[in-house]
Amino acid sequence: GNSVTQMEGPVTLSEEAFLTINCTYTATGYPSLFWYVQYPGEGLQLLLKATKADDKGSNKGFEATYRKETTSFHLEKGSVQVSDSAVYFCALSGFSGGGADGLTFGKGTHLIIQP
Amino acid sequence: DAGITQSPRHKVTETGTPVTLRCHQTENHRYMYWYRQDPGHGLRLIHYSYGVKDTDKGEVSDGYSVSRSKTEDFLLTLESATSSQTSVYFCAISSTGGGPYNEQFFGPGTRLTVL
C-alpha cells in the first residue's frame, strides 16, 4: 500500500535559517504529492502540490520538487520566520480504483522557529 | 477559505455513549472525508463519501459509521465510544475525489475526549 515517511522533529531553527524537511514515499503508479501546514489549534491548510515527476510546487517562499527517481518530495525554504512555526505534513493521493481516494499522510514534522 | 464547519468543536463524553460529529460544507463538493489525527500517526482516513448515500470505509473504520443524506452534510457516529477513540477528528472535502488533482480542504477539527 501507499506510505509516506517524514522526519518528525521537533525541528528547531533560528529565524532566517534555511529549512529542509525530508519526505519520501512509497506508492504504485504516479501519485500526486502535497504539503499541508497546521498552525496551533487549526485545521490543515494546503501549502503546495505537485502532480507529476519533476514538477515544482511553490507557495509563500516554500518549494518542493517531485523526484520520482528518489521517491522524494522534500520541503525547502530559504529563510524561515517565526510565523512559520507549525506542523508540516507530507501527503500523497493515489489511484485506488474505488469510489474516491483519501490522502495518505506522513506523521508530521513540528517546526519551531526561534527569534 | 473553503466553507467547511464542524460541530461540536469540543466534546467530552463517557465510555459506552453514542457520539455524532457533523461536517457541513457550502462548496457543493461531491467528495467528503473523515480523518482522525493522533500523535505519532499523522492523519488516518476513517470513512469517505463519493455522493449522497454513497460511502465507503477507510483505513481505520472499526467502531465508526457514517451517513450522508444531503450533499452538504456528512455525519460520523461512534456507536459506543471507547477511550481509544479520543482524538481530533477532521472533515475534508474535494471536488475531484481522486487522481492527480485530489486537493482536499479541511475543516477546523473536533477534539473528542472519551473518559
Image (spheres, rainbow, N blue to C red):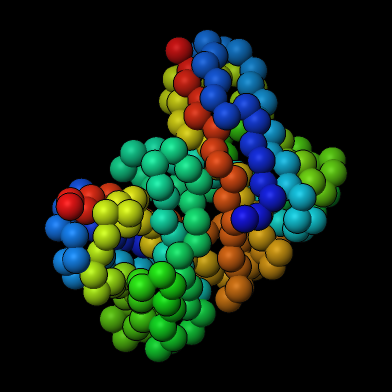
Whether residue A51 is situated above or below residue B80 in the rendered picture = below
Q: Is residue B67 left or right of residue B59?
A: right
Q: Residue at x 40, y 88 (%)?
A: A54
Give the image location of residue B66, x and y in percent: 70, 37
Q: Nearer the viewer, residue B105 or B17?
A: B105
Whether residue A11 is situated above or below residue A75 in the rendered picture = above
Q: Residue at x 71, y 64 (%)?
A: B95
Say if residue A62 shows up in the picture.
Answer: yes
Give the image location of residue A107, x and y in percent: 34, 51
Query: Looking at the rendering, which quadrant does residue B77 occupy?
Result: top right
Say if residue A3 shows up in the picture.
Answer: no
Query: Looking at the rendering, which quadrant does residue A82 occupy?
Result: bottom left
Q: Residue at x 60, y 73 (%)?
A: B101
Q: Residue at x 30, y 52 (%)?
A: A85
Q: Nearer the viewer, residue B76 or A50?
A: A50
Give the image location of residue B84, x and y in percent: 43, 25
Whether residue A11 is situated above or below residue B63 in the rendered picture = below
The number of callouts visible is 0
Whether residue B16 is situated above or below residue A48 in the rendered picture = above
The quadrant of the picture occupied by the N terminus of chain A is bottom left
Q: Nearer the viewer, residue A105 or A80?
A: A80
Give the image location of residue A73, x and y in percent: 34, 74
Q: Is residue B54 left or right of residue A104?
A: right
Q: Residue reaching furthest front? A: A115
